[in-house]
Structures are given as structure tokens and as C-alpha cells.
Amino acid sequence: MSQLPILIYPDPRLRKKAAPIDAVDASITRLAEDMLETMYEAPGIGLAGTQVNVHKRIVVLDISEARDEPHVLINPTLEILSQTMLEAPEGCLSLPGFYEPVARPDAIRVAALDRHGAAFELEAEGMLAVCIQHECDHLEGRLFVDYLSSLKRQRIRKRLLKQQRIRA
Ligand code: NI
């Protein structure tokens, strides 16, 4: 397994829409494992292909405290199950250091393939529902800052650009 570099906002590649995966072959299983390792090392609770510059519809996540409940979702499709919105602070490995509240439906159902290509469905609520929606947004080129005011988004953008200049 190997760790993959994570794109940092406002990298324009984070805005690319990911393409469906035709076949879950050995290269995809390997990609899922590399993404899980990258997420655990970061550390983070979720990671989308888009964030490691692989524009394919795959996300990995693990919201468990023990970090032993990995989920791999390939070609995920979401269905909203609740009109109740949950507002919770979100962060993102592509926006290191920033946490802002975002409101999202608090219950969803997701249909996807696992890392071996088997179809499954998962009903999720609370944090898991939030995390799945956040990761699936990445596949559409959407980031959690898109739900904030443009003033807030611009402020975060400026600070991240400045940090990247300092590191460069
Ligand atoms: Ni994210």
C-alpha cells in the first residue's frame, strides 16, 4: 500500500466531476486500499478519489473511534430519507485546519459497490450520513465551503493560498 498526495483547495482539479468505474478490477481494489491508508495516516474520516487526483467515482470513509470500520463506496448513488436537517461542523483533508457548520439531511440511503465489486446498500443517519454526503459531493466537484457565504469562502481561500506560498 502507499500513501497518495492530497489536493489542497483551491486547486482547480478539486472541481472536476468524477467518472463512473466500469469494472472493479485489481487496480481499483489497490486504489481503495491506498486511499484508506492515506485517509488513516492524514488522519481523516473520509476521502474521495477526486482529492487524490483520481477522477473516478470512489470514496472511502471510517467514522469509528477505533478506526476499524472502513467503508469503500464505488459508484455511490444517494437517496435522501429525511427532511430533517442536521447542522454539524465539517472539515476536509483538502481544507486543512478549517471547520465550519454545514446543514445536511440527517438520514440517507446509499447504493454502491464494495472494493471487490459486490453491490450493497447502506442506510445511514447522523455523522455517517453527513460524511457520506460530504464525500459524494467531492465526486461532483463540490466542497463543503460551497455551502458557506462567499465572504467566508474567500477568507478561507486566501488563507490556504497564503499557507501554500509559505510552504513552496
Ligand atoms: Ni472532504
Image: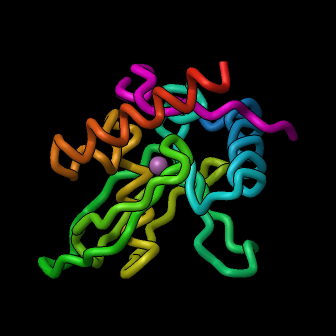
User: Quick check: can you spot residue 152?
Assistant: yes
View extreme (left): residue: 83
Q: Is residue 157 above or below residue 99?
A: above
Closer-to-camera residue (153/147):
153
- Prevalent SS, magenta region: loop
Q: Which residue: 46% across, 58% down?
A: 91
Question: Residue 141 location, x and y as percent?
Answer: 34, 33
Q: Magenta residues, as a range?
A: 1-22
Q: Quadrant of the N terminus?
A: top right
Q: Which residue: 38% across, 55% down?
A: 134
Q: How is the image coloured?
A: rainbow
Magenta includes 167? Answer: no
Would you say 101 lies left or right of 47 here? left
Question: Residue 87 location, x and y as percent?
Answer: 26, 75
Q: Quadrant of residue 75?
A: top left
Would you say 2 lies left or right of 117 here? right
Q: Is residue 30 above or below residue 36?
A: above
Would you say 166 lies left or right of 154 here? right
Q: Is residue 43 above or below residue 121?
A: above
Closer-to-camera residue (133/23):
133
User: Quick check: can you spot residue 21?
Assistant: no
Q: Is residue 149 above or below residue 16?
A: below
The number of discs equals 0
Question: Residue 81 location, x and y as percent?
Answer: 21, 75
Question: Residue 43 location, x and y as percent?
Answer: 70, 57
Q: Quadrant of the C terminus?
A: top right
Q: Which residue: 75% across, 74% down?
A: 68
